[in-house]
Amino acid sequence: MKKLAFFQRFLLPLLLVGLFAVLSTTVYMFTLNMREIEADAHQETNELAHLLTMAKSLVEERVHSSMELLKKNSEALGTPHIRGTVVLNGETIPNLTFAEEAQIRQSSLVDGVTSIGNGTATLFVKHHDAFIRIATNVKIKNSARAVGTQLDPTGKAIPFLRKGKAFYGVVDILGEPYISGYEPMFDQSGTVIGAWYVGYKVDVKALDQAIKQWSFLDTGFAAIRDYNHQLRFVSERTQPLAAQSILNQTDDRWVIIKKRIPDWNFDAYIAYPKHEAYLQSIGNLYPILVLGSVFGCVLLLLASHAIKRFVLKPLGGDPETAYNLVHRIEQGDFNDDGTHAPPDTLIGNMLTMRQRIHDMVTELTENADRLRVSSSVFEHAHDGIFITDSTARIIEVNPAFTVITGFSREEALGKNPETLGFAYQIEAFFSQFFESTKQQGEWQGEVWNRHQNGETYIAWLDVFPVHAKTGEFQHYVGLFSDITQAKEQQKSLEHLAYHDALTKLPNRILFSNSLQKTLAHAERTKEVVAICYLDLDEFKPINDQFGHEVGDQLLVMLAERLQSSLRKQDTVARLGGDEFALLLSGLHSTTEYTETLDRILAAIEAPFHIANHAFSISASIGYTVYPGDKNPPDTLLRHADHAMYHAKTHGGKQYHLFDLQLAQLSRDKHQLKEDIAKALSNNQLSVYFQPQINVRTGQVVGMEALIRWQHPQKGLLLPNDFLPLIENTHQIIDISEWVIENALGQLKKWHLAGFDFYVAVNIAAHHLLDKGFETKLAAMLSKFPNVPPHYLNLEITESAAIGEINNVTHIIQQCKKLGVTFAIDDFGAGYSSLTYLRRLPVDSIKIDRSFINGMLVDSEDLAVVSSIITLCKEFKRTVIAEGVESADHAQKLMQLGCDLVQGHSMAKPMPANKVMQWAKAHAPFKFS
């Protein structure tokens, strides 16, 4: 400690004093050098100013002598005065004369004065406040004399001349500095009437050369700017633009020394970068810095040696480190903070002691944490836990044990788990387990336990031994949980997976399983099995009108009826919606199954009473019989589905046995429906046109658009071959819209070619009643603005019009506002009601071909045709007869008052590209 005190008292202060002395001296000398550089810059600017002053004084003496000569020569001519006015350069000015001689444009006087040197002279006449040059050898840009020009009114000489005073100084003339003299010219009354001027150009080349050689430091420069801050002279080491930029800016990286030169109205500058001044100042301090560094190093070596020998070596580190280490240990901080020290030093011994204390505290903390975690898990676990000794007697249980078993901790301690109802279905389970495993084995699985109140529950039990670190057996631990509810949920989920949620009937999966088992059994016993597919006929309207809740109740009641109508060995399943499957087994003839199916149909047709409503429905059933139809289960159900479809399409309320030929037909129709979906996108559809003719005039008045399908395998198909399959689907809408746009496009072409006929397009009821029909029709018409809408005639069947007469009437009225016309097709084959004919706002009626074909041989058909024509006349409807196949038919129709006809004998439907050719060849049309 004495050595440390010695170092602190002498060595360290000495080091600090030395460093402070060196630093203070350095700062002082640096500041002194910077001031000296700045003083040199000021001296340089003074020298620049002196250079310009000397140049001015050399020329100024010549100016005075020339001025005296000019005035003397002027006086020799006579006294100056104003004699009238004179026009100069289009302006009237006073006429200055010397005696009687006018001086305007008299150059001899001014040229004689300055001919001996590079100078200029001028005579001015005062005109108002301005001074006009009337005689001068000052040249303007085109080298002409500046006679008639005005002295700069803002110049330095003007104020002096107006006051009648002389002015001598530097004046800028045409961008060059002149040492100039101006003296006022007085008349006999002492009034200023003009002025004399003499000026000599400064030798700027000599000045420029002198200043170009000027320098300051390494990159500093000298410069001179005029009163407009324009750069006149600058050192050649600096570009003029760069120098101008430096002088204009306020960049603190440069020092700019400025000196005003009043005689010239110029400014002299010396500019130098600060960093060069710093470097030069520091360079001058080099000897002092070297000496200071040597002195500091010596002191540092001495101090370092003393610290290492007297302090750090025995301590093992910095004294502050030792102090902080003791403080942290005192505060209870035993963590490693990265401190290191050699062994057998004070700090090294302290670190060893701290590590030992840290290890002890860590071990105690970890043990306490483990015990606390184990205790928390044991107390809060939802699974029951019990611990036994080597004799299988319980020594501890957790709270969950009491919750699950009903036995308190006090009741359980000292008891064998068997006496508390564990694994009661296995006799002496724990005794046998403990003996057989010899305190080494583990067991887990499901067991049945009995609660304290006598109820039983299913538990998952896991029993395992616990050994000490030495490997000696200590305890058995049992973990168990009540899984009764999970088992029930599993059973419920399995039921939901195989049963319909609404009706509780088996679903498709369970039905398939039952079908496979039943077929395997029938294969062994040679029994007959009927697989049935049931679909309700009138269920959708009930669902739509009364809501799904009523529909669901009806399905539940139906499921109960079906179950009550079958035997126990039979199966009924709900496949989805209003579709059910039946599996009838255990009988030996088809007759027995048909009796069952009759009973089921009768049960279904009995009224259902729901919410004060009675509902009557029926069903269509298709079935197939195994082993007559010996196919896999899925195929059998599909065959039953095909048979059901046949029953439904033939009126419903019946059952039908699967027929292989019928199935093939159904598959063909299904395939055809799939092909239709691709026909439009694959450009397989086309539109043919059949003429409608006025037989009285022979004029072709219209064309009926008829769709054709060029099937890739079946060839050209007519509408009746495929449209009925999609008549009530959205596909009919897509196809109809395509036909309308195609027809409008053809109308545009025909009208441009000069053919004036309309096009009739058949519209299905499903399309007409589709939401937004009018909007889509308007959009299609807007694509063809050159086609008047009344040339489009939309034909609807009589049955479609009457079936939804209110809606159809409204739609027709809305569409007619667009300009299109409407016709009823196949009239007479349906309702043929006068009331309907009157209510429907159609434009024309097409008589069904069945009446036209027989009208010449059947009086009843003739009476119908005659009545329809008469009614159309009364209701102001146009009438068209289709199916006219002979001239006799046409003649009879004309007699009855029907002039418009259509038929294959006149013209078969033809492609669009042949219509115009046909129309030209048959204008007018005549029966052959």
Image: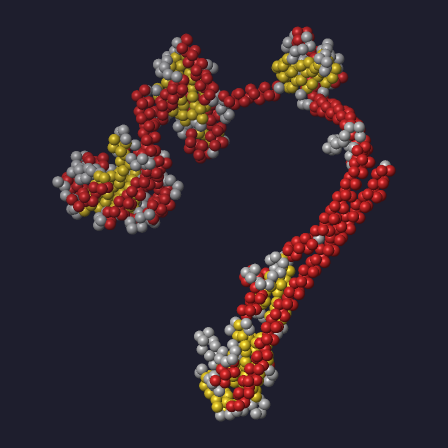
Residue at point 79%, 36% (across, down):
308
Judging depth in this view, the residue of 118 and 268 nearest the camera is 118
The single residue placed furthest to the right in the displayed view is 2
* Residue 414, visible in the rendered structure: yes
The image position of residue 680, as x and y in percent, is: 32, 36
The image position of residue 490, as x and y in percent, is: 56, 20
Judging depth in this view, the residue of 601 and 258 nearest the camera is 258
Compared to residue 156, the image places residue 303 above or below, namely above
Judging depth in this view, the residue of 270 and 127 nearest the camera is 270
* Residue 864, visible in the rendered structure: no
Q: Quadrant of residue 144?
A: bottom left
Q: State which quarter of the image contains the C terminus.
A: top left
Residue 484 is left or right of residue 530, and the answer is: right
Compared to residue 335, the image places residue 573 above or below, namely above
The single residue placed furthest to the front in the displayed view is 116
Judging depth in this view, the residue of 703 and 679 nearest the camera is 679
Residue 683 is left or right of residue 435, and the answer is: left
Residue 10 is left or right of residue 736, and the answer is: right
Q: Quadrant of residue 169?
A: bottom right
The image position of residue 866, as x and y in percent, is: 21, 41
Q: State which quarter of the image contains the N terminus.
A: top right
Residue at point 55%, 62% (across, down):
236
Residue 334 is left or right of residue 501, and the answer is: right
Q: How is the image coloured?
A: secondary structure
Compared to residue 306, the image places residue 121 above or below, namely below
Residue at point 54%, 80% (across, down):
198
The image position of residue 44, as x and y in percent, is: 64, 65
